[in-house]
Amino acid sequence: MLDYHIHTTYCGHASGELEDYVRHALTQPLQEIGFADHLPMLKWARPEYAMSFPQLPHYVQEVQQLRQRFPALRIKLGIEADYYSPAEEHETEELLRQYPFDYVYGSVHFLDGWAIDDPRNMHRWDEMGVDAVFERYFHQLQQAARSGLFDIISHPDVVKKFGHRPGKDFSALIEDTIKCCKEANVAVEINTSGLRKPVHEIYPAPQMIRLLHHYDVPIVFGSDAHSPEEVGKDFAFARKTAKECGMQELVIFQQRTIDGAIPL
């Protein structure tokens, strides 16, 4: 089993040093982990959302040092990068190419400058309307997949985090999003953190996982850990759900390419 989505104090909204996460991972049935803290934000300096630009090389160095200190566990260097719009693609690409990441997560957290997953922004949902938020979110996720910037799309239906449900049927839009992932040759993450959020559901929902299987889109697992004890959390449930939806394996990344797979 692998956990590719681990945050630390670098991101400004998690607790625990990198070594704390590694030591907890060693107590779990994990063959491999990957850190994926938030890439410095290109559009805003928001220390509660992501690391600063001066912190980025220190983060990379610390992960590389942990690889040497804990050879019993495969440790990958990942990053989670937000997708804002086509206007920021070149700058994002230039920043990412400076570091030897094993994989890059692509995420959509911001619409028109506000974070859809921040509880302080609940009033924005009322202002924009749930259907409009869902539609904008999935269109922006499609842009992220097509951009060529990312290797994995993370928590693909995180838009449901607070339990919002659209009034419209967005099944065609969601299927088109999965098709985009297939056409762009990006993997998609099954993320267990939704089970710890108000929605109390895995990301993505089983109907999306079945589409991933139908379109033969590779998957990885991520806990989205924000404290050491969350590493690998609820992976037994994720494994059961993924297998029930037809999935058989998780892919492994190395130097931003798929480098094998492990069975579920």
Image (spheres, grey):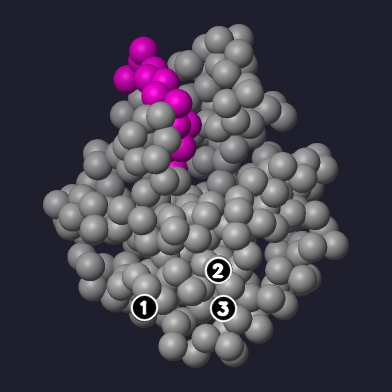
Does residue 112 appear to the left or right of 5 in the view shown? right
Residue name at image x 59 percent, y 89 percent: 68
Does residue 259 appear to the left or right of 7 in the view shown? left
Q: Closer to the N terminus: mark 1 or mark 3?
A: 1
Does residue 250 appear to the left or right of 21 in the view shown? left
Residue name at image x 63 percent, y 65 percent: 17
Q: Closer to the N terminus: mark 2 or mark 3?
A: 2
Magenta region, main secondary structure? loop
- Residue 84, relative to residue 127: is it above or below? below
Residue 47 sits in which quadrant?
top right
Query: For the N terminus, which image quadrant?
Result: bottom left
Gap in Å between the C-alphas at discs 2 and 3?
25 Å
Q: Residue 255, labelled with which disc?
A: 3
Q: Position of residue 142 (x, y in %)?
A: 51, 41
Looking at the image, can residue 251 be seen?
Answer: no
Q: Which residue is mark 1?
A: 31
Q: Position of residue 99 (x, y in %)?
A: 72, 73
Q: Which residue is mark 2?
A: 20
Range drawn in magenta: 156-169
Name the secondary structure under disc 2: helix
Q: Closer to the N terminus: mark 2 or mark 1?
A: 2
